[in-house]
Image (tube, rainbow, N blue to C red):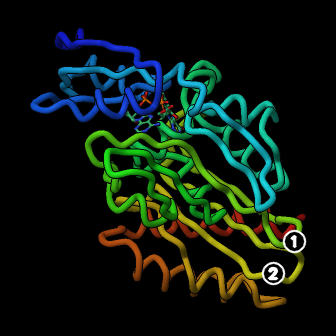
Amino acid sequence: MKPAPFEYIRPKSVAEASVALGRRGATTAAIAGGQSLIPMLGLRVALIDLLVDISRLDDLKAVTETPDGVWLGSLTTHSQIEDGKTPDVFGGLMRRVAGQISYRAVRNHGTIGGSVALADPAADWPCCLIALDATVRVVGRSGVSVQRVADFIHDSYATTLTTGDIIMGFDIPAPKAALRWGFAKVARKSGAFAHSIAVVTAAGKDGPATVVLGAAGPRPRPMAATANQLAVPATTEEQLRAAIATDLDANFEGLDAYQKRMHTANILRAARDMRTQ
Ligand SMILES: Cc1cc2nc3c(=O)[nH]c(=O)nc-3n(C[C@H](O)[C@H](O)[C@H](O)COP(=O)(O)OP(=O)(O)OC[C@H]3O[C@@H](n4cnc5c(N)ncnc54)[C@H](O)[C@@H]3O)c2cc1C
């Protein structure tokens, strides 16, 4: 199908884009890489009056290593991260995640800001950024706000963004010691959206662990019991399985026996991936 007719503008600044997105009486949307929005317009699952093209705004493209970590502008593409063109203080985790998103053509255009703004339950960046305890900076009509990505996404395809808001980018804190990590995905075929995404991290040899599971419910969830168990030296697979079962029941409703087995196996794969480092 073709999209329904809409007006298109390309503002010259973030402020101008924000004003346009807030146009009274119109349904508006920002477009960044267009990898999700264009298909949604074509299928008419999204109907808008005004498309605001933010893809050339330099203020959204900044990428820097800060004293505390890394700043990634919202227009940073998946392929920039995959190709190592962004600072990597995460031991290669972000490169691995980027390289497994869809196909290269999608990665060349798709942006980290667009992925988080859309908050698809099976998207990779929300899981990874929550595991890294990243914050998102948003500019809107009421000024600038900073929130943890874990709080910013509150449901399936639902964030705290309101009309006129634009994601500027993400502050990703550097780990306190060399990051160990594991990443595992279950997808029907290479490049397809995942049925399970597990990100496991630990700072240093004995640092606290973080486990985040995605594609299991409306939004990615930290798995606290599993993380605590993983931090115990010489923990057994049986103990880990028990902790995962506790977390699945606590965080995700309505999983059937197959889904529980799949998520359990996937988290164990990610944990093994980390333990080999
Ligand atoms: C075939 C295919 C397979 C895919 N597979 C995967 C996959 O395996 N894993 C995965 O994670 N993703 C996958 N994706 C999604 C892809 O990563 C998209 O790039 C991403 O979801 C959206 O980024 P975008 O820049 O293209 O956003 P757009 O499509 O331009 O926009 C998406 C939404 O975000 C909003 N938006 C964009 N930027 C901003 C901003 N700065 N501030 C506020 N709102 C903003 C838009 O208004 C829109 O609502 C796939 C996409 C396709 C087409």
Judging by the rendered image, the residue that carries numbered circle 1 is: 177
Label of residue 84 in the image:
none
Task: For label 1, count other residues whose C-alpha is less than 10 Å away and answer few (under 14), some (14-19) or many (20+).
Answer: some
Instruction: Quickly name the residue at label 2.
Output: 207
The kind of secondary structure element at disc 1 is loop
- The image quadrant where one finds the N terminus is top left
Q: Is residue 230 above or below residue 40?
A: below
- Identity of the residue drawn at 84% across and 70% down: 275
Lower position in the chain sequence, tag 2 or tag 1: 1
* Residue in front for this viewpoint, 123 or 260: 123
Is 40 on the left or on the right of 175, as rendered? left
Answer left or right for 212 relative to 80.
Answer: left
Residue 73, quarter of picture: top right
- Indicate the amino acid at tag 1: Ala
Q: Quadrant of the C terminus?
A: bottom right
Q: Is residue 82 left or right of residue 223?
A: right
Q: Locate residue 211, reporting x and y percent.
A: 62, 71
The spot of residue 120 in percent (x, y) is 40, 46
Q: Nearer the viewer, residue 246 or 138?
A: 138
Quarter holding residue 53: top left
Residue labelled 1 has its Cβ within 8 Å of some atom of ligand 1: no
At x 60%, y 25%, the residue is 58
Q: Residues within 10 Å of mark 2 (few under 14, many from 20)?
A: some
Which residue lies at the image location 77% right of the left edge and 62% below the top edge?
68
The residue drawn where x is 43% and y is 66% is 151
Q: Are marks 2 and 1 in contact (CB under 8 Å)?
A: yes
| Residue at disc 2, secondary structure | loop
Cα separation, mark 2 vs mark 1, equals 8 Å
Image x and y of residue 254, in percent: 30, 70
Q: Position of residue 188 (x, y in %)?
A: 52, 40
From this view, report whether residue 276 is shown above or below residue 197: below
